[in-house]
Amino acid sequence: MNSLTDVLFFKHSNLGMLKADHNMKITAINDAFSNITGYSSEDMIGRTPNILSSGRHDAAFYKRMWRSINCRGYWSGEVWNKRKNGEIYPELLTIDSIKNEEDETKGYIGIFADISSQEKDPIDLGYLAHHDPLTGLSNRLLLKTRFKKFLDLVKRNNAKTAVLFIDLDAFKPINDTLGHSAGDSILVEVAERLSSVVRKTDTITRWGGDEFVIVLDVINKNESPAIVAEKIIGALKKQPFIVDEKNLYLSCSIGISVYPNDADNGEALVRKADIAMYQAKSLGGSQYSFYKDEMTETIKNQHNMLGDLRNALEKNQLELYYQPQYSIKTGEMSSVEALIRWHHPENGMIPPDQFIPVAEAKGLIIPIGTWVLRTACQQALKWMKRGTPLVVAINVSAKQLIDNNFSKIVEMVLNETGLPSYLLEIELTESLLIEDIETSIHTFQQLSSLGVNLAIDDFGTGFSSLSYLTQLPVKKLKIDRAFLKNIFSKKADRKLINGIVALGHSLGLNIVAEGIETLAQLGFLRDIGCDLAQGYLLNRPLKADDLVIQPYNFQYKSSGTELTKIENRIHMHIKLTDNFNIGQVADLKEEMGSSLTNEEVVSIDASEVETADAAAMQLMAAFFLHMLDKGIDVEINAPSSAFLTVVRLTGLGPTLGLL
């Protein structure tokens, strides 16, 4: 007896078991099934359970049975069946439907006990009726019975309780790639980990598939359910699940509803916790959400969106836009990032951050991702044939990455389209990559063997050891736009970007900064040696036909700035002319950049500035930040009203030392 699974499937051998597919064709039976019915595996595999029918139940009986299975996910009761020798006997039967992540029925499991004998074990019969046969947890029937009595007690004592609805993240690919036996063993261990973090007075139920429901005993504080949710998430993530000598990392999404705030009956509390769970999953999973009334409308919209999204694939409503990446040194357009757009016939343009989470949660991300891959490769081939080859980068989700067939899909699409693999780049965000680093390394190695370029997106947000960088065959790091946004207000972000550039270059990687919106940001990145730039300042995402493939002019022309130096090693004085523009900043950098040391003080006279260009001001602020970080003092003396006006408009007063 090595595990709970062994106990339930083998030790209790008086319980007959069968598994069937979604068409009710039997796929497996156990020994107890044969002992009770007289039918062997050879007799039953591939046939339906109708062979057991005794003829004692009419069509209305089976109609009620299947209505319960289809609506509630299970049925339990007493039936009369027929053995192979023709003998009719009574049995206590439970039928559970097996659901996938899209809540579609993929099979059934039936468990029964022969109750014709006078020596039947009443403990086994009660266990069968009220417990999940795989995990040993309570089933929906037992939860319903206990919940009603428990809520009556809570109401009488004017107390509070909470329901946690738990759904495992990305569990379906495990079943699909490793088989249901592996999935079953994980579910058993999940049940054990859940039991280890809740109180004995709390009720844990296997709701179905990879879903669990926990009813907490009386809670004293509103934050108590959140503490339990955090413990559950931690219990699942802290140690890998070991299956066939492979380390698998799992997370979960948890929805929480509270009595009496959200509902006054068990059915409504579970339903609202389920809604909150979908909210947590839509935010990326591995987190919890409390139910809010507006979530019901959100879930309704998501269900509507799911149907529309299926049609979008079929009716060619999806489209790719391409945003260029430029070499900061040469201005050359070297690559583009493919970005999906959805033109809804009624609602117009729907941004990807609204429909991609729905696609991921409902299993549409694989076909949508394959469409993106094929469409991007076809377009890249067109550019190559025109003599303007560009590397095209596509983003993939974690569910695509852990799909065992992903590298095969990439290879298939490359072969179909004829695109050379070096013109394709696969991007994955750092936070998703490190959730299952072993799988990520394996898949990245497969893609690298095809000759595909690999990049880590949103680098710096993963909060993990950087040792994985030496194990992944990546060629590019993309700095998260959030760090770039704050370089003028947070010195730590400037240092972090500097560190990422230095780290990447030490490993032979190219560094991309995305989300560039101002010349100040661009100037800062150029000063620290960043390789590639992407953002609205340079070019917006465009349709392929609207994209002009040409270099970007990063050179700024001087407009005759008058600079005056006092030949002193310590002090440098610069007097700005009346028209302060980008050309003056370029000259200022050229005159000062190579000679400055960390002992110098730079003072700038802005008293005669009559007009000032906001772009020049931003660029100068970036240059000053660079000097300040090197320990050089910068002073601006007697700024004119025109100079101060632009400073206020650009919000760069603190950066330039001006209020």
Image: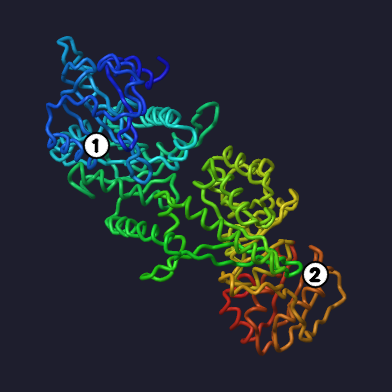
Q: Quadrant of the C terminus?
A: bottom right
Residue farthest toward the top in the current orientation of the protein: 119
Residue farthest toward the right in the current orientation of the protein: 567
Badge 2 local density, few (<14 within 10 Å), some, or many (20+)? Answer: few
Q: Is residue 294 above or below residue 541?
A: above
Across and down, in percent, residue 537 comes to 61, 73
Left or right of 112 in this view: 371: right
Q: Tell me what residue is drawn at x 29 percent, y 46 percent.
A: 273
Across and down, in percent, residue 147 comes to 20, 36
Residue pointed to by mark 1: 218
Q: Tell me what residue is drawn at x 68 percent, y 55 percent.
A: 420
Badge 1 local density, few (<14 within 10 Å), some, or many (20+)? Answer: some
- In the foreground, 563 or 30: 30
Q: Is residue 248 above or below residue 620?
A: above
Q: How many marks?
A: 2
Q: Which mark is residue 593?
A: 2
Whether residue 627 appears in this view of the structure is: no
Disc 2, SS? loop
Whether residue 592 appears in this view of the structure is: yes
Asked where in the image residue 588 lies, by quadrant, the reply is bottom right
